């Protein structure tokens, strides 16, 4: 199913009267923006789903987890590649962040019908944790598969690989981790990725501001300028 079809199906579900949702749609130049707010007894979800010239462009999500914890997520779609940033925060204090890399043909409908899609598979997911006024790498995993629950941990509890190779379903991963994460993906849609392992407090605040305001609609580049090792 295409990303655009996933968006359409989600928005159609949101308009069903039995669901506790508010929804709207606006055209802003080349951007077609659908807005859905869903509130139940457990959590509040606020989505903005954006197409540019009819093509999936980005998704923004704000989620209230309760007890003062919230998250902001920004996802961008470009040439089959899906890049995702998630910031966990309490007020304006960011306590952790996650950066993920997947592909548009690996997205699937959410079985719980709460999100526009979920990751059926992901090439890489990285978690960062706040410590001593910085955000440092905490976990890295490759080749996540929702259906089989397969994954290959590189950095995790009890796991610390500085260099590794992994093959899963025809996709070969080669990774090195030191002062940066260097990942080479071979197979269908090969590419190279190089992400930083530590961010300063000012850089994290810049990411939070980007996700809090509508500058995210213009593209991934402000995130790339901070996350990617150049």
Image: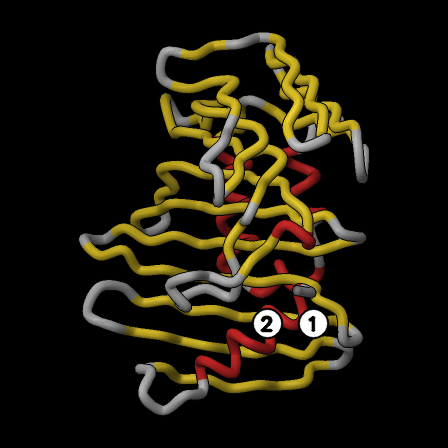
- Residue found 51% across the figure and 66% down from its top: 116
Residue marked by disc 1: 51
Circle 1 packing at 10 Å, graded few (<14), some (14-19), many (20+), is many
**Quadrant location of the N terminus in the rendered image:** bottom right
Q: Earlier in the sequence, mark 1 or mark 2?
A: 2
- Residue found 74% across the figure and 28% down from its top: 185
**Quadrant location of the C terminus in the rendered image:** top right
The answer to which quarter of the image holds residue 174 is: top right
Q: Position of residue 149 (x, y in %)?
A: 45, 36
Q: Position of residue 151 (x, y in %)?
A: 50, 29
Between 211 and 163, which is closer to the camera in this rendering? Answer: 163
Between 223 and 38, which is closer to the camera in this rendering? Answer: 38
Q: Position of residue 2 (x, y in %)?
A: 69, 65
* Residue 99 placement, left or right of 93: right
- Residue found 58% across the figure and 31% down from its top: 143
Callout 1 secondary element: strand
Position of residue 54 relative to residue 106, above or below, is below
* Residue 170 placement, left or right of 197: right
**Looking at the rendered structure, which numbered label has been put on residue 63?**
none
Marks 1/2: CA–CA distance: 9 Å
Residue marked by disc 2: 7
Which one is in front in this view, the residue at disc 1 or the one at disc 2?
2
The answer to which quarter of the image holds residue 188 is: top right
- Does the CB distance between marks 1 and 2 fall below 8 Å? yes
Callout 2 secondary element: helix
Between 183 and 185, which is closer to the camera in this rendering? Answer: 185
Between 149 and 59, which is closer to the camera in this rendering? Answer: 149
């Amino acid at each position: 199913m295409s990303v655009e079809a996933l968006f359409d199906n989600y928005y159609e579900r949101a308009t069903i009267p039995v669901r506790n949702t508010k929804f709207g749609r606006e055209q802003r130049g080349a951007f077609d923006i659908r807005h859905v707010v869903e509130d139940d007894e457990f959590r509040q979800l606020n989505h903005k789903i954006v197409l540019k010239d009819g093509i999936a462009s980005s998704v923004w999500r704000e989620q209230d987890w309760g007890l003062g914890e919230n998250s902001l997520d920004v996802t961008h779609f470009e040439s089959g590649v899906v890049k995702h940033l998630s910031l966990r925060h309490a007020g304006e204090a960011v306590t952790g962040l996650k950066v993920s890399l997947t592909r548009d043909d690996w997205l699937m409908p959410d079985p719980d019908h709460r999100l526009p899609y979920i990751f059926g598979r992901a090439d890489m997911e990285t978690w960062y944790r706040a410590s001593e006024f910085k955000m440092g790498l905490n976990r890295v995993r490759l080749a996540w598969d929702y259906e089989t629950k397969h994954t290959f941990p590189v950095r995790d509890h009890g796991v610390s690989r500085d260099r590794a190779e992994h093959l899963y379903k025809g996709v070969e991963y080669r990774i090195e981790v030191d002062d940066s994460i260097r990942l080479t993906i071979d197979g269908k849609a090969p590419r190279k990725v190089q992400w930083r392992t530590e961010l300063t407090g000012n850089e994290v605040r810049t990411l939070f501001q980007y996700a809090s305001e509508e500058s995210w609609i213009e593209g991934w580049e402000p995130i790339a300028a901070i996350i990617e090792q150049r």
